[in-house]
Image: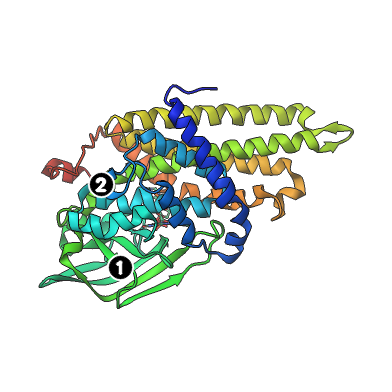
Amino acid sequence: MKYIYFKEEHELFRQSVRQFFEKEVVPHINTWEAERRIPKSIMQKMGEQGYLGLNFPEQYGGIGADFWYSVVFLEELGRINLAGFSTMVSVHQYMAINHIFRAGSEDLKQRYLVPAIQGQKVAALGITEPVAGSDVANISTKAEKQGDFYIINGAKTFISNGTYGDFITLACKTNPSAGAGGISLIVVDLQSEGITRTKLNKMGWHSSDTAEISFDNVKVPTQNLIGKENMGFYYLMESLQLERLVAAIMAVPSAQAILDMTIQYLHERETFGKKLARYQVIRHTLSDLATEIEAARNLVYNTCWAFSQGEVVVKECSMAKLYASELANKVVDKCLQYFGGYGYMEDYPICRAYRDARVGTIAGGTSEIMREIISKVIIDRVDFKPVYDSLPSKQDLARV
Ligand SMILES: Cc1cc2nc3c(=O)[nH]c(=O)nc-3n(C[C@H](O)[C@H](O)[C@H](O)COP(=O)(O)OP(=O)(O)OC[C@H]3O[C@@H](n4cnc5c(N)ncnc54)[C@H](O)[C@@H]3O)c2cc1C
């Protein structure tokens, strides 16, 4: 089926991304998962193709393409069902460096955005702390100003690209008594003195590197502040729209690929003299799943369209992430069942997909938090506004 959003050039781009992943990523999936590490060389290769700067302007090495190129790219990432890899790439491009582009100084853009788009430097985003995940306003990592430097103390956890990454867009308290209004975003080199990184062991996303990072009197130049001091929380809240949309975009083709591989298996496997594909109970279950995937795809596309028009789509991004990530879990759970014992074997890709899907309803904002945000809009009538270029009003601050 064709969708009105994609033009011929998007489909040509899809073919080239697909070929690139088939050649440069898919053959290495098992090695990267076993080694629990993805070599940085793949980021450099993607940088050379322009894949890490799709929506950034040419002056920073990007290709200045429209948002649908990113949708295509993310769909192809989702389709290969290697969530460890897609996390590395999506956190880098759509979560960490996005802030530098939106609010960072020219100096920051030259030092961090440009090499990140080239794939020379890998970026992480540091919000979550051991005692503050969903409750972002409650983080306690501090950045105290001393002359021309910030001195940073504290700890972050569950940070993707945290162990082997080169720099981090770090959320810190610059005014600890001000709650949400006291958070700033600061770019920190991950090789800085005073930083300790500990790799974490996960249920899934094995190839993605996830770290706990501690900061002990880490000295960072004040030029590394992104945008305005104490505006970090609002930058984060606005950019989390994109983060959630990105997660939703990838979840749909991932679920579709699982469904497709299951259908193929049902045509091959026989019990009681019949192919599994002939059993009505299975046919109806898969028909329901296919219908829900199609509904999710349309919700995601429509949200992408509104987002690409510059609309503030906080509610819709939360709905898309909630629905698509919950559905991805449901699809892989139901489909694994039809593989019988083989679904539980590591040799079958659905086994890894099952482990990988689980965190989709947790990372980047849990399903419960998505429901909280949706409730704020539909029940409390909160009207979220763009914040990058303007300070929020006292009323806006009170509503967060
Ligand atoms: C593999 C992985 C990669 C990650 N990558 C990153 C990263 O790169 N950068 C980063 O900053 N973070 C990252 N995270 C962190 C992730 O965003 C957080 O785990 C998530 O936001 C939840 O925070 P928490 O784990 O502290 O859970 P908590 O906030 O402690 O929540 C625990 C449970 O309580 C529920 N809950 C909390 N508050 C409410 C409420 N008000 N109403 C109802 N239920 C509630 C939650 O939904 C959840 O079910 C990653 C996490 C994982 C697992």
**Quadrant including the C terminus:** top left
Q: Which quadrant would residue 135 be assigned to in this image? A: bottom left
Judge from the rendering whether residue 83 lies leftward or rightward of residue 183; answer left or right.
right
Q: Secondary structure at mark 2?
A: helix
**Numbered mark located on residue 381 in the image:** none
Q: Secondary structure at mark 1?
A: strand
Judge from the rendering whether residue 149 lies leftward or rightward of residue 196; answer left or right.
left
125 and 278: which is toward the camera: 125
Name the kind of residue labelled 2 in the image.
Gln
Identify the residue shown where x is 27% and y is 67%.
141
- Look at mark 2 in the image and give the residue it sits on: 59
Percent x, y of residue 294: 53, 27
Badge 1 crowding class, 10 Å Cα cut-off, few under 14, some 14 to 19, many 20 or more, is some
Find the distance from the CA under tag 2 to the CA under tag 1.
23 Å
106 and 291: which is toward the camera: 106
- Look at mark 1 in the image and give the residue it sits on: 189
Badge 2 crowding class, 10 Å Cα cut-off, few under 14, some 14 to 19, many 20 or more, is few
Total labels drawn: 2
Above or below, comparing residue 193 to residue 309 in the picture: below
Judge from the rendering whether residue 141 lies leftward or rightward of residue 131; answer left or right.
left
Image quadrant of ligand 1? bottom left
95 and 380: which is toward the camera: 95
Percent x, y of residue 297: 49, 30
Identify the residue shown where x is 41% and y is 45%.
368
Residue 335 showing in the rendered view: yes
Name the kind of residue labelled 1 in the image.
Asp
Identify the residue shown where x is 19% and y is 58%.
107
